[in-house]
Amino acid sequence: MLGTPVDAGKVVYVLGAGFSIPAGAPTQAQILGDILELDGWNAKVAEAKTRLETFLIDDLRIRREDIPRIALEDVYTPIDRCIADGTAFKSRNAADLKKIREDLGYLISVAISRRITTQIGSGKADGEYIHAFAEYVVAKAAKRAEYAKDAKDAKRAKAYDPFAIISLNWDILLDNAIHSALWNRDPGLGGDYDPFGVVDYCCYISSVQAGDTRIRSGLWSLGCRGFNVKLLKLHGSMNWLQCPNCQRLFVEYGLKEDILERVGETCCRHCEKYGYKNPLAGSLVMPTFLKDLTNFQVKLVWQNAGVELMEAKRLVFIGYSLPNADFEFRQLLSRMVHQDARIDVVLRKGGSDEDSRRYESTKERYQQFFGDRQIEFHLNGVTEFVEKHISDAASQPAL
């Protein structure tokens, strides 16, 4: 049975790239190819794309026709090694490499945004299951605020912590869907100390716009007898911007294109009060074998993710293949997941020989990693699982 009774302990959903693919998001292997096809966007994209192509062809010696098949780790790792050591890569000094790295991060975000918009616009993708999942988790989290209304339920409200979502994706399909579900639930709220729900990234955040009261920290909302929907994004997010001076993390929802255009253009509104001009930068942890997880906000997210994993009675991996390259996350799982935790893995087996080999390889990886824990594999893909999971949960008796 896929549904989980509300008193059966915490459920942690772990989302990989496969969670967003039915809604139009690319696989990581498609991103460089998509970047090459970014024509007619704007001058900023064109200049960044030219610099990146020149580096890949002239310095990494990759033939242009082979670029779409190159792993992102093989691009980022030599760049990051040289930056960390303060050495040059052939004729490129550390400053040049940092600029190329910034270009690639920006282009990745643009390419993801372009593909999702194109796929949904052409009818080749449908994100309705993401909105359904968002409505489900918001309704589940909102019970805490309902308990907090009654003084007799105050203890119950504090103890109510049924789930968390850990995402390894950059896209903001789920972020936007949760934010919209929260707004639809309480459209008239937003003033100071109104008890409403928020997307809780489990770190310190500010809104880009000073008057946007719907973007608050989870602790603030809980302190006002509201509720939080915990969404821990281990590799950052396309709607996060960070001040390089005060290290505040700024959040905005809506169109990814609008958010991306703020990079390097919008300044930290907190630092501006004291006369400092610090343009906001993107905040993505890129695919590299030398991941830098020392960022203060990122460390908070990872620390909180470890706590959620430790408390989980059940882990549901959706569209995540547990790749060996994610060794930081694998070690977090190895350290923190309880020995009695139940494991569900949602994949799509497919009908081709290649799909079957990929599935068998992923299945073996999970079985070896989690050992003698109870593991159940669900093979009909994300959309069907989400629909059935919500349906089964709805049939469970409430507390």
Image: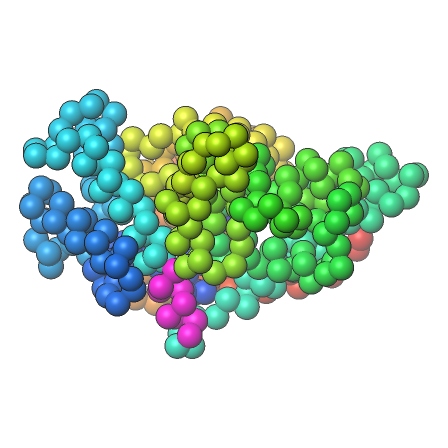
Residue sticking out furthest to the front:
275
Residue depicted at x 45% and y 53%: 259
Q: Pick the residue in front: 371 or 128.
A: 128
- Is residue 98 shown left or right of residue 205? left
Q: Main secondary structure of the magenta part?
A: helix
Q: Compared to 223, does 146 lie above or below?
A: below
Residue 256, image quadrant: bottom left
Query: Where does the N terminus fall, quadrant-wise?
Result: bottom right
Which color mode does the image show? rainbow
- Is residue 165 shown left or right of residue 170? right
Q: Pick the residue in front: 145 or 386.
A: 145
Looking at the image, can residue 246 be seen?
yes
Task: Give percent across and percent down for residue 211.
Answer: 63, 49
- Is residue 223 shown left or right of residue 323? right
Q: Compared to 127, does 96 lie above or below?
A: above
Looking at the image, can residue 236 be seen?
no
Residue 349, image quadrant: bottom left
Residue depicted at x 50% and y 66%: 127
Residue depicted at x 32% and y 49%: 106
Residue 151 located within the stretch drawn in magenta: no
- Is residue 69 shown left or right of residue 139? left
Task: Give percent across and percent down for residue 125.
Answer: 43, 70
Task: Give percent across and percent down for residue 339.
Answer: 56, 30
Residue sticking out furthest to the right:
152
| Count of picture labels | 0
Residue depicted at x 52% and y 59%: 254
Q: Pick the residue in front: 115 or 53.
A: 53
Task: Give percent across and percent down for residue 196.
Answer: 74, 49
Residue sticking out furthest to the top:
85
Residue sticking out furthest to the bottom:
123
What range of the chain is rendered magenta?
113-121
